[in-house]
Amino acid sequence: MRLPLDHIVIAVQDLERTIADYQTLGFNVLRGGEHPGRSTHNALVVFADGVYFELIAWRAPAPEERWWQQLQQHGEGLVDFALLPTETGTAVAEAQARGLSYEAPYEGGRLRPDGAQLRWRNARARSQDLPFLCGDLTPRVLRVPEGQARVHPNGVTGVARLEVAVRDLQASLARWRALLGEGVDVGPLQASADGRSERVSLRLGSTELVLAAPLQAAGELAQRLDTRGEGPYAVVLSVPRQESARKLDEAATHRVRLELARPSGIEAETAAA
């Protein structure tokens, strides 16, 4: 699987309160630990498909960090997402060879509550419609636990769809093609039901990635771009039970547009496997 979705970042003010709220929504929330050299600490919601939510908060101001800036300027919510390369440097070199601009890879890490030290190598795109890359230097299972950690009382099994707000659909699609390389699965261009946006979908393993751009100055998507800029703005999670399908209260999700829906297509095959 080439560059699958790794995790989705949710910036919050109070990590303890957020953990409690997500637990009330039926998610199994794991304490992630601290990031050495930063004032951040986090918690994880890990799904059966291997993707996870990172709930991240700051113990002290960090004006040099983009996620902290977004939290202060626009409040809680989705701020970023990452793909999983086999090796970060190789993925960056391949993207650069196809004309895409990525910053040089850099190392990061986390100290888990049990004392385990994790290390990874990240690389960030220069355009916010693209994700950052997060490749493990220590075994991924240390960063993303398996087994019962991925079982949730609400029945959620994975991320079916991630929607990303972009300003110029064709320009963003070209950048995504450069990132993913040959053989990327791109769906047809479609207009939204209300005619206010156009969108196209790509496959990231079992996850559908939707790039959406406004066709009108008015509307929720245009407003999102005016405030937060380009980036992730909505998530649909797979839940096998029809009675569990619903949209979640954004007060409880800390301003994340989050919907539980029955899987279909590739997602249904994955859930049944």
Image (spheres, helix red, strand yellow):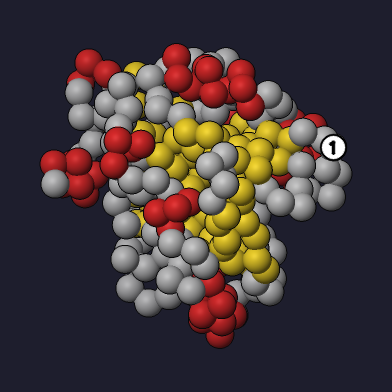
Q: How many marks?
A: 1
Identify whether 29 is placed above or below 113: above
Which residue is at 57% across, 63% downward? 120
Q: 214 or 180: which is nearer to us?
A: 180
User: Left or right of 201: which side holds 12?
Assistant: right
**Residue at image point 57% right, 47% down:** 115
Q: Secondary structure at mark 1?
A: loop
Q: Is residue 158 visible?
A: no
Q: Is residue 26 above or below residue 150?
A: above
Residue 37 falls left or right of residue 189: right
**Looking at the picture, how far across and down is residue 204, in whole percent?**
37, 57
Task: Please report the residue visible at 39 percent of the width from the left and 34 percent of the height from the top.
Answer: 236
**Residue 35 seen from this side:** yes
Disc 1 residue crowd, few under 14, some 14–19, many 20+, Cα 10 Å: few
Q: Amino acid at mark 1?
A: Pro
Q: Which quadrant does the N terminus fall into?
A: bottom left
In this picture, residue 103 sits left or right of residue 61: left
Q: Between residue 48 and residue 263, name the one nearer to us.
A: 48
- In the picture of the structure, the residue carrying the numbered disc 1 is 61
User: How far from the left and from the top, in percent, is residue 86?
Assistant: 43, 71
Q: Is residue 174 above or below residue 6?
A: below
Q: Whole-percent x and y of residue 133?
A: 55, 62
In this rendered view, identify the residue nearer to me: 234 or 196. 234
Residue extending farthest bottom: 97
